Image: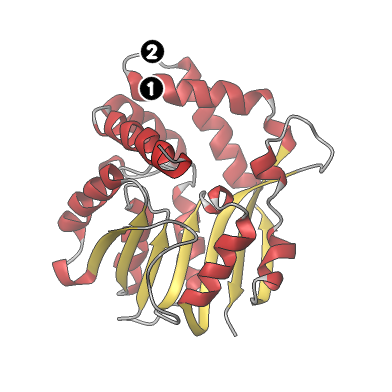
């Protein structure tokens, strides 16, 4: 089995566990201010959706790609707010099934579709989309620059990208994983061909994330999804000050 197949199998089970855990979704919804029925899987608070929506500058009827979309809630909400059409893409078939179900309750059927793909291999043509968002996933591209180059290829001239992720607070900190040490969006977005690059640290998002992990650890261990959230929370809080929460935007010339 390839590494990609192993990763997809792991995340398929992760998303299946989430779908069976109203307790897990309630913790995330309460701490991040998210509507629980949308099935969000990342650590972006509700206020971040408005930031992404504004940064993308999508035309009504334009095409938005939410790559690494997971259960799809963030991209669905942005499409709803802007009138854009949506392609949600992830390498987990289970996540995409959930995204399709959530989208069917919120968007007309001709406004959204969900496809298997990865951060570096989307099978979409050059210049296919008007905007691209990637919430808390660009760090999974190996290396991140390869994902950013694929994002640049997919955007029409003038199209916008909005990315959320984490970066190391110090390049010398051994507590930070190699995956996060490789993240440097201020360096890599221009190297991928983008202009108008802005990278902002988001301390309020980071504070909301801390609340998420603390609430998870205080919750009863009721099911596999809650246990997974607690495991991630323990690991994250042990080195919380080692990471910066970042929001990056850029334009394809």
Residue 93 vs residue 223, the one in the foreground: 93
Q: Residue 242: where, in percent of width, then height? A: 74, 35
Q: Residue 188: where, in percent of width, then height? A: 69, 64
Q: Which residue is mark 2?
A: 220
Q: Is residue 69 left or right of residue 111?
A: right
Looking at the rendered structure, the secondary structure element under dot 1 is helix
Residue 131 vs residue 22, the one in the foreground: 131
Q: Residue 50: where, in percent of width, then height? A: 46, 61
> Reading the chain from its start, which is encountered first: label 2 or label 1?
2
Q: Which residue is mark 1?
A: 226
Measured Cα–Cα span from mark 2 to mark 1: 8 Å
Q: Residue 232: where, in percent of width, then height? A: 52, 26
The number of numbered badges drawn on the structure is 2
Q: Looking at the figure, which quarter contains the C terminus? A: bottom right
Looking at the rendered structure, which numbered label has been put on residue 68?
none
Residue count near mark 2 (Cα–Cα under 10 Å), binned few <14, some 14–19, many ≥20: few
> Is label 2 in contact with label 1 (beta carbons under 8 Å)?
yes
Task: Tell us which disc is closer to us: 2 or 1.
Answer: 1
User: Residue drawn 49% across and 18% down?
Assistant: 217
Looking at the rendered structure, the secondary structure element under dot 2 is loop
Q: Quadrant of residue 31?
A: top left
Whether residue 55 appears in this view of the structure is no
Residue count near mark 1 (Cα–Cα under 10 Å), binned few <14, some 14–19, many ≥20: many
User: Residue drawn 39% across and 41% down?
Assistant: 5
Residue 183 vs residue 102, the one in the foreground: 183
User: Residue drawn 29% across and 60% down?
Assistant: 115
Q: Quadrant of residue 206?
A: top right
Instruction: Please identify the residue farthest to the right as the structure is shown.
Output: 172
Q: Is residue 188 left or right of residue 247?
A: right
User: Residue drawn 38% across and 37% down?
Assistant: 11
């Amino acid at each position: 089995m390839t590494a990609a197949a192993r990763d997809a199998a792991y995340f398929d089970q992760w998303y299946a566990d989430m779908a069976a855990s109203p307790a897990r979704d309630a913790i995330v919804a309460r701490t991040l201010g998210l509507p629980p029925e949308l099935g969000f899987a990342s650590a972006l608070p509700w206020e971040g959706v408005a930031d992404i929506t504004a940064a993308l500058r999508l035309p009504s009827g334009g095409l938005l790609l939410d790559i690494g979309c997971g259960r799809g809630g963030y991209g669905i909400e942005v499409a709803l707010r802007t009138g854009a059409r949506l392609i949600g893409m992830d390498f987990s078939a289970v996540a995409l099934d959930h995204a399709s179900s959530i989208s069917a309750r919120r968007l007309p059927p001709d406004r959204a579709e969900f496809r298997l793909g990865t951060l570096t291999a989307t099978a979409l043509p050059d210049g296919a989309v008007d905007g691209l968002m990637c919430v808390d996933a660009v760090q999974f591209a190996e290396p991140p620059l390869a994902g950013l180059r694929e994002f640049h290829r997919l955007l029409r001239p003038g199209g916008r990208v909005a990315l959320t992720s984490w970066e190391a607070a110090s390049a010398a900190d051994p507590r930070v994983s190699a995956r996060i040490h490789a993240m440097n969006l201020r360096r890599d977005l221009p190297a991928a061909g983008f202009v108008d690059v802005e990278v902002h640290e988001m301390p309020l998002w980071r504070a909301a994330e801390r609340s998420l992990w603390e609430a998870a650890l205080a919750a009863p261990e009721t099911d596999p999804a809650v246990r997974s959230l607690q495991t991630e929370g323990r690991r994250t809080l042990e080195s919380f000050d080692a990471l910066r929460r970042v929001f990056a935007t850029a334009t394809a010339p």
